[in-house]
Amino acid sequence: MNKKTALMYAVDLLARQEQSEKRLREKLQRKGYEEEEIEAALARLHEKHYLNDEEACQHQFDYLYRESRSSVRQICLKLQQRGFEASLVRQCVPRDTFEREQKAAMKNLSLKFKPSADQQKMLASLYRAGFDTSVCRGAVEEFAAVAEEE
């Protein structure tokens, strides 16, 4: 059986999931392809617009920002772990994230705690999840207010 070319393997990977160039390069290297063949494959993917770190990073950031309960800090770390440059990731972050962060923190609390839970434990949980101090305090106060209303 013939071994796939680096380009074919890279296209298969991209068909399954958007990749950063760095991550794609690492996967091709681990698979044992020669550096010359990897460079040619990546150049061809760029030429055909199948590989674009700016677009891929923005798509993945937007999805995680909308769909997850992760803090912006966690989202940024996750994208950097996926091989995107930190400066590229920072460009994706909207100017004002407070309201979104507050909602995500509230969602986190509602999944892990009862409104009557120890506020210090709730704060610690949100801090560990990467939320800003002001977001943590605001979310815990709002969440605990639900217990007082009941």
Image (cartoon, rainbow, N blue to C red):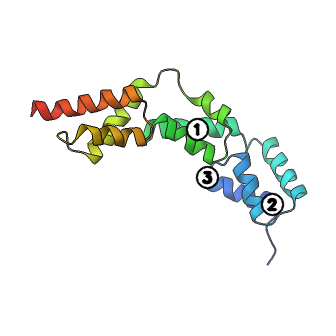
In the rendered view, tell whether residue 15 sits above or below residue 142: below
Disc with the residue nearer the chain's start (3 vs 2): 2
Q: Which mark is residue 6?
A: 2
Disc with the residue nearer the chain's start (1 vs 3): 3
The structure residue drawn at horizontal position 35% and vertical position 43%, both measured from the top left corner, is: 125
Q: Can you say which quadrant of the picture contains the C terminus? A: top left
Q: Which residue is mark 1?
A: 59
**Towards the viewer: 65 or 43:** 65
Task: Name the secondary structure under disc 1.
Answer: helix
Residue 23 placed where, x, y %?
70, 51
The structure residue drawn at horizontal position 32% and vertical position 29%, both measured from the top left corner, is: 137
- Amino acid marked by disc 1: His
Q: Residue furthest bottom?
A: 1
- Amino acid marked by disc 2: Ala
Residue 40 placed where, x, y %?
87, 52
- Amino acid marked by disc 3: Gln
Q: Which mark is residue 16?
A: none
Q: Can you say which quadrant of the picture contains the N terminus? A: bottom right
Count of numbered marks: 3
The structure residue drawn at horizontal position 32% and vertical position 37%, both measured from the top left corner, is: 123
Task: Name the secondary structure under disc 2.
Answer: helix
Camera sees residue 69: no
Q: Residues within 10 Å of mark 3 (few under 14, many from 20)?
A: few
